[in-house]
Image (cartoon, coloured by chain):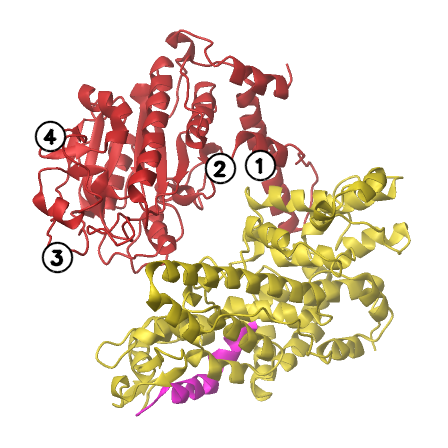
Chain colours: A yellow, B red
Amino acid sequence: MSVLSFADARHLLNRTGFGAELDAIQQLNQQDRQQAIKKLLAAPRNFRLPTPKLHDFQTLRAMRKTSADAKMAAKQQVRKELKQIKLWAIDQALQNPNALQEKMTWFWHNHFTSSLRSSMRSAELLMGQTQLIRQHALGNFADLLRAIPYDPLMLVYLDGIKNVREKPNENFARELLELFTLGEGHYSEQDIKEIARAFTGWRLHGKTGKVFLHKKSHDTGTKTVFGSSGNFNGDDIIELLLQHPRTAEWIAEKMWPVFISLTPPDKAVIQQWANAFRTSGYDISTLLQAILTSEVFWHPATRATLVKSPLDLVIGSMRAMGLAKDKLPLSALNLQLRRMGQNIYLPPNVKGWPGGRSWINDTTLPFRQQFLRNISRGMDKNHDDAGMMSSKRMQNDLRIHKLPTLASNYWEQWLLPQGATTETANKDPHLYLQALLLDPTYQLK
Amino acid sequence: MNRRDFLQLSTLLPTLGLAPSLFASQGTPPLLIMIELKGGNDGLNTLIPVENRAYYQLRPTLALPANTALKLKDGLAMHPALQPLKPHWDSGDMAWIQGLGYANPNRSHFRSIEIWESGSDAAQNDTQGWIAKLYPEAARTLNGLVIGSDHGPLSESAFDTIIMDDARNFIRLTQQLRAMRAKTTNPTLAHLLDVQNNVHQNSQQVIDTLQKTRTTNTPFPQHKFGKRLAQAAHLINNGLGAGIYKIELSGFDTHKNQLRRQNALLNQLATGLAAFSQAMQQSGQWQNTLIMTYSEFGRRAAENKSGGTDHGAAAAHLLLGGRVQGGIYGSAPTLSAQKANDLSYTSDFRKLYHSIATQWLRRPSPWGEFGAFNLVHS
């Protein structure tokens, strides 16, 4: 039996959540490691904030038909609603007690990438996809993979709706293999062509926006994929991919830089995770259990070597500093994320955010530090003016209002994954807290 | 003098005249000033085929009458708002390139600007900027400055760049990032410290340069674009040392009210660039300066029903500079009232990139297959 120290508990939560929340650390401190991991993976997954009200596909379609002005109004309405979905997702990340579910939701969004720009027909498309991903984030990968080809937003984003028998469009087929299941080098160009044919004919109904198979546009001919032949349809292809041993390996490889380290993955470890994942029938929690219980996750050499993503930094800091449940200006947080290079639901391209070291560059680092400086601006001197602030300013104020309850000699261990790089000691607790947040190691996890 | 005094002084006394010789800095790299016309500038109403009947048929309300447009040659005229640049045309240091675009044009702002700025094919997913591609092994020194919101052609460059929306905000944002001397065995932390030291050093370089007061007696227009150009000119003339500049002018997505909006924007473009060129002439840098415009796409040949134009394909772009071989390059896209759709490109935009890379920046270029215009004289 291995018992978690305070630092171990912080490490576990830093990597499975957004940032280490004090009460969560204290709950895990001195607990059995296996038990703690089990508990983490068994946490309830039902936290849902009310979703924004959206105009549906049909209503918007009717609007667009009436006049040029109404068409423009429909466009603006959809834009507004897409922004509301972003803010809802940020709030959800701030408040969901099961932070791992949020983390994995964003992991899968960065795996099955789409863009909110493909949701202009109706914001329902984006909402539908993000709910689908959220539902399966800690569930079963096979179920998620089976649903993804027919997800309306994905059909638009990767040109599935343009993929017809007469003129197959390979965009989805290519990314299905290259990004979603096998990774480069494990399929042929011919496989892509054949798989594109298998997915032909899926469309969005012009009136309702519902997905349906237009039979005339579907190719019923024989396709040969990975050496086997038949009149495969899309579902058959997904099953072939789930039988392919590379699929579990590829997902395991993608987990490595998210949970372990930025160095190339250890092949033996990947094999072990992939086996556990595959034999469980692609149960995501089983894969996570394999990852979190592996020695490499706890090894001193891999600690403090990952970079906090903008979501980790922004959401994690708000949660850790006890600001998450205040009435927050969510659009201010959205702006912060955008400046730091993670404009949610809008990845730079189909490969998603590369993450790792690329989060830190000449442009993003000043914004990351500015955010931390702002939230930790010593409130002692501003105590009095807080009462005089207009309610609007109060609402836009992201500053830390209460000092942590933990004794300050534990703060460094709590906030930093390794010893501070700079001189942080300060008698003034506000300035000390600020110095810790501004220390470069706070950017790591 | 502290920074605030300086900023006030420099706006109060913009006419501190200095002799050109004072500015003649040694070893200045060739200056490339890229002006991004964000939103998709309507090329057809910028360089106008005033003698083409189809133009008037396609644009019953938006066509600019031949008698107000600024006549150049070969049946082409400039938008009247570009009047401040007409002297450059007359003196032969302004060039127009017609019909710039690419095969299988994409009409998404986002995607099409990525294609233009990366210098890639329409079907290629590539985010590295075309300028960055020309300097694969550059040293990490400050060689690029963006005044605007994104790196564009400078994305993922080996050399250092600074991006600022405005000098004052930039100073506020970066001045508190300290230099760090810590040693570490953690490779991720080492990267972070490296970036931090670099930002510190480069921003210090910009701040120091901004505090220098060598200035020309050129008055810049007071609009946002004019102020951006004034800041760029100030940095260049005070020895920042960077060679590549990207400056944004936004608002060209003229789906409606195009006449008024494009007129205002082209006026900003022309008054700003006229002032900038004057400042470069006074500092003796004009022979070392090349200005180019670009945009994600041109607009549709036929006007829409809202007094505007929708996303199109090819468009004309301009070059200015002391060593530009003035004239009109490329061929005009075919304009037909029957085929009201799009302007097809006549020159791939990478032909322009290849010309600039080889003739101006003196770099090997990957775009030789597209050919070259002879744009620069010695």
Q: Earlier in the sequence, mark 1 or mark 4?
A: 4
SS state under label 3: loop
Chain of the residue where label 3 is placed in the rendered structure: B
Chain of the residue where label 2 is placed in the rendered structure: B
Chain of the residue where label 4 is placed in the rendered structure: B
Q: Tags 1 and 2 in contact by the CB under 8 Å rule?
A: yes
Q: Earlier in the sequence, mark 1 or mark 2?
A: 2
> Residue A266, can we see it?
no
**Count of all numbered marks drawn on residues in the image:** 4
Q: Earlier in the sequence, mark 4 or mark 2?
A: 4
> Residue A83, can we see it?
yes
Numbered label attached to residue B160: 2
The amino acid type found where label 3 is placed reads: Lys
The amino acid type found where label 4 is placed reads: Lys
The amino acid type found where label 2 is placed reads: Asp
Instruction: Report the magenta residues as a range.
Output: A230-252
SS state under label 2: strand
Task: Kindly identify the residue that appears in the image at 34 percent across and 90 percent down.
Answer: A232
Which residue corresponds to mark 1? B198
Numbered label attached to residue A370: none
Separation (CA) of disc 4 from disc 3: 26 Å
Separation (CA) of disc 3 from disc 1: 54 Å
Which residue corresponds to mark 4? B73
User: Looking at this rendering, what residue extends furthest in the bottom direction?
Assistant: A230
Separation (CA) of disc 1 from disc 2: 8 Å
